[in-house]
Amino acid sequence: MDKIRLRFKKTGRSVYISHLDLMHTLQRGFSRAGYSLKYSEGFNPHPQISIALPLSVGASSLCEILDFKLKEDAQLSDMADRLSRVMPEGIEMIEAYEPSRKVSEIKWLSIEGLMEYDERDRGQMCKELDKFFAADEIVITKKTKRGMGETDIKPSIKSIEFNVCDAGIKVSATISAQEPTLNPELLVDALRQKMPELCPDFAKFTRLETYDAQGKVFR
């Protein structure tokens, strides 16, 4: 057995664990569960473990993907359960399997969000949000590898809709996962920059599922 893929959830209090701390947490979890991660060779060996799409602090996910290698063969059927038992609250392993596809094939993410508006009419906000994100382009200023620059995020939004709910306005969207990556927080940044009167008082997002370029669920 070469590479193993594990799907897991990151919810509740664990959303405040940074990516680096999460990697350390996962490595310790493997050790506590009785698994030995395989290390790279060379002058600076490191465990061969990686998360496909690192998650921002504060965001939750039901579809995180972890690839890793073990020193010895292991039974996959009970791996998720064994690891879940030693993980902190909010990190739950779903299933372990041998991957047949490359992570680079992930193209889209379905997400769900909640936007809270304390003093404004939610129905009206919903209509205005629909109108704003229906524009042909949404050019915002964001940080890039070369510094601050202007980027049109509209091509990275495959679909988006807004609906009033008891807690605020529910956001349902499918956005680009990589090449380019669209952080859901940029949806709020776009409002803050272009239409501040529509910017929510608070917003949070959850990843629901990963898809390939053809819209098929990625595993």
Image (tube, rainbow, N blue to C red):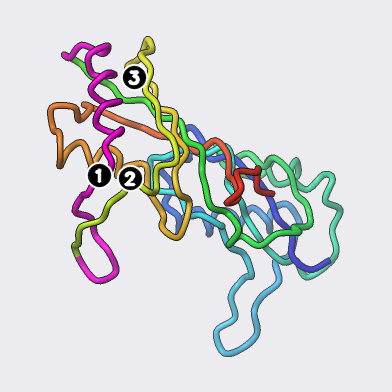
Mark 1 or mark 3, earlier in chain: 1
- Secondary element at image label 1: loop
Q: Residue at x 30, y 33 (%)?
A: 134
Mark 1 or mark 2, earlier in chain: 1
Amino acid type, label 2: Lys
Can you identify the residue that label 2 sits on? 154
What is the CA distance from the residue labelled 2 to the residue labelled 3? 20 Å
Residue situated furthest bottom in the rendering = 43
Q: Residues within 10 Å of mark 3 (few under 14, many from 20)?
A: many
What is the CA distance from the residue labelled 1 to the residue labelled 2? 5 Å
- In the image shown, does 14 or 123 lie closer to the viewer? 123
Q: Residue at x 44, y 34 (%)?
A: 173
- Secondary element at image label 2: helix
In the rendered image, residue 106, in percent from the top left (x then y), is placed at: 57, 54
Can you identify the residue that label 1 sits on? 138
In magenta, the rendered stretch is 119-147
Answer above or below: position of 125 versus 154. above
Can you identify the residue that label 3 sits on? 169
Image-based side of 131 in relation to 91, left or right: left
Image quadrant of residue 170? Answer: top left
- In the image shown, does 192 or 203 lie closer to the viewer? 192
Answer above or below: position of 34 versus 121. below
- In the image shown, does 129 or 35 lie closer to the viewer? 129
In the rendered image, residue 155, in percent from the top left (x then y), is placed at: 37, 48
In the rendered image, residue 20, in percent from the top left (x then y), is placed at: 45, 59
Amino acid type, label 1: Ile
Q: Nearer the viewer, mark 2 or mark 3?
A: 2
- In the image shown, does 116 or 148 lie closer to the viewer? 148
What is the CA distance from the residue labelled 1 to the residue labelled 3? 21 Å
